[in-house]
Image: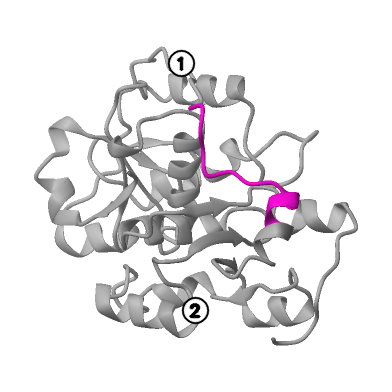
Amino acid sequence: MTDIVSADWVNDRLDTLKLVDVRDAWEYDGLGHLPGAVNVPFETFRAGEDDSDGMLPTEGTWATLLSEAGVGGDDEIVAYDDHHGVFAARFLVTAELLGHDPDRLHLLDGDFSAWQRSFGTTSEPTAVEPADYAVDPPDETPLVGPEAVSAAAEDPETVVVDTREQSEYAEGHIPGAVLLDWRDLVDTESRGLLPREQALELLAAAGIVPEKRIVLYCNTARRISHTYVVLRELGFPEIGFYEGSLTEWEAQGRPLVTGSE
């Protein structure tokens, strides 16, 4: 499964990993990057103009993007950004949903800054040899649609989780959803995941426990990507991923609740 790894772990395996930097090109070039990393900016793997913002890219777009970046279908990937991992997590979840082996997908804990604190960076461009990336979506994924989300909100064994900010939640959320700002699981100093027990306690306080099925949503599926990776890291076995999130939910005229529940 997609997991979270330390800078030390990455450094010990530099020769065997494909490092993917999802920051903007000017950051990759101007601020430096991990040695050997290729640049796949976040905006390049958002959906096209004919789709809802933030949704999955087409299979053809994804295959072309990774092929041109020199990423192969069997590569072991570590993705990173400089925003606590939220954009890199979106890259990894996209890869998982489109068929990359989740056991070969990793998020750099503490983002670019964690590496920068301990190891050297470079501004030299990485030589890229185009690959032949083939998309092969799995038969089963964590994706759920709006009808399933609506049913989940009525199921006592399921917790629907809104991963946005408190003000967004108060303005309007899916009925029955609990609030968990995705950033609450991130240590503000290290920029990495909270210590395991602290994270589990925070989740439990919101009713989010491994014994329950968890269904995640935000606005455009970016923030839930980070929470999804974190929950997998913490051992949550059953997670639903509402890719359409509130963009789709509102477009369909489905009900919202205001205020705090």
**Which residue shows up at 51% across the image and 33% down it?**
140
- Residue 147 in magenta? yes
Circle on res. 152: none
User: In what element is the residue under mark 1?
Assistant: loop
User: Residue 154's spot in the image, x, y percent?
Assistant: 69, 67
**Which residue shows up at 53% across the image and 19% down it?**
64
* Label 1–label 2 contact, CB within 8 A: no
Q: Residue furthest top?
A: 132
Q: Label 2, on which residue?
A: 207
**Which residue shows up at 44% across the image and 37% down it?**
96
**Which residue shows up at 31% across the image and 58% down it?**
233
Give the CA distance from mark 1 to mark 2.
40 Å
Image: magenta residue range = 138-149
- The answer to which of 19 and 174 lies nearer the viewer is 174
- Residue 210 in magenta? no
User: Residue 200's spot in the image, x, y percent?
Assistant: 34, 76
Which image quadrant: the C terminus? bottom right
Q: Is residue 37 above or below residue 88?
A: above
Q: Is residue 219 above or below residue 194?
A: above
Mark 1 or 2, which is nearer the eye?
2
Q: Answer with the quarter of the image where residue 150 lies.
A: bottom right
Q: Residue furthest right?
A: 253
Q: Label 1, on which residue?
A: 134
User: In what element is the residue under mark 2?
Assistant: loop
- Amino acid, disc 1: Ala
